[in-house]
Image (spheres, rainbow, N blue to C red):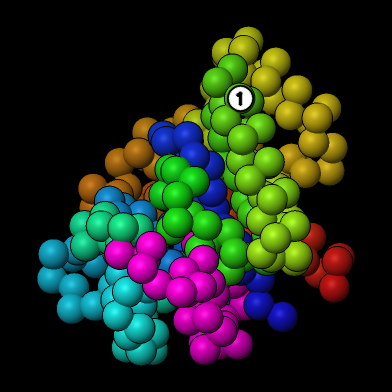
Amino acid sequence: MTKILAISNQKGGVGKTTTAVNLSTALGLKGKKVLLVDLDPQGNATSSSGLEKTKLKSTVYDLLINDADIKEVVKKGKYYDVVPANQHLAGAEIEMIQIKQREVLLKNQLKIIQQDYDYILLDCPPSLGLITLNGLTAATSVLIPMQCEYFALEGLTDLVNTIKKIKTNMNKEIQIEGLLRTIYDRRNTLSKEVSDQLSTYFPNKVYKTIVPRNVRVAEAPSHGLSAIQFDKHSKGSKAYLELADEIIKKEANNG
């Protein structure tokens, strides 16, 4: 069964896109068939995957608004395939208001090709608008990247409440897959305190893997590469490879 994993947090700058791109690469390296869907108008996952945003003939916008053929929108890659995004997606939410069953547009598109993949990762924008709603409605579970800082906990409460509402009204399958601690600084006392709180409030939901603050991870997107492709031996790259192992192992145990 295909796992559709929404990578979501309405707070920006927590490593959503970095996680989406590097986890896609890591899963692909481990022999899994992976599709990465860029749902952010900034298109950072698209450019980090080596695609030129301004030269795309079709994107996720065309899937949601123009009912394009998803097989033609998917761009094939070495480690994973991509449904790309660019600035055209920015106005999509206004246009989606006019469409019936607008919250399941992405879900209906993914049904066409999901049997071709082991994992579909959805890089959601930093908001809880209609595009993110489409991602959460299509997903089987949610991976929440977060920095270990005070305000991150406040935002997490809002996201958890949103997931509960979606589970009740739109997507009975959805659950929290796990919380991923990102951009982690072991020297910071607050980081450790928040990390401990997460483990207390969300037992069995916090990944063992911790992604450290790492310069090589930050440098990779400017080269159109994942950190794993850019420098496989960096601490950040090793963390995402460990995360892929953790997710695959969990899947096997649950299966």
Q: Is residue 133 left or right of residue 85?
A: right
Number of residue marks: 1
Rendered residue at 21%/62% (across/down): 88
Depth check: 150 or 27 in front?
150
Mark 1 residue crowding within 10 angstroms, few (<14) / some (14–19) / many (20+): few
Would you name the residue on which mark 1 appears? 154
Amino acid type, callout 1: Glu
* Percent position of residue 217, x then y: 40, 42
Residue extent of the magenta highlight: 95-123
User: From what the image shows, is residue 8 above or below residue 113?
Assistant: above
Q: Position of residue 234 (x, y in %)?
A: 46, 42
- Left/right placement of residue 120 relative to residue 171 reads left
- Residue furthest top in the image: 189
Q: Residue drawn at (75%, 66%), measured in percent from left and top? A: 173
Quadrant where the image shows the C terminus: bottom right
> Which residue is at a point 77% across and 44% down the rendered structure image?
205
Relative image position of residue 53 (x, y in whole percent): 19, 63
Helix, strand or loop at label 1? It is helix
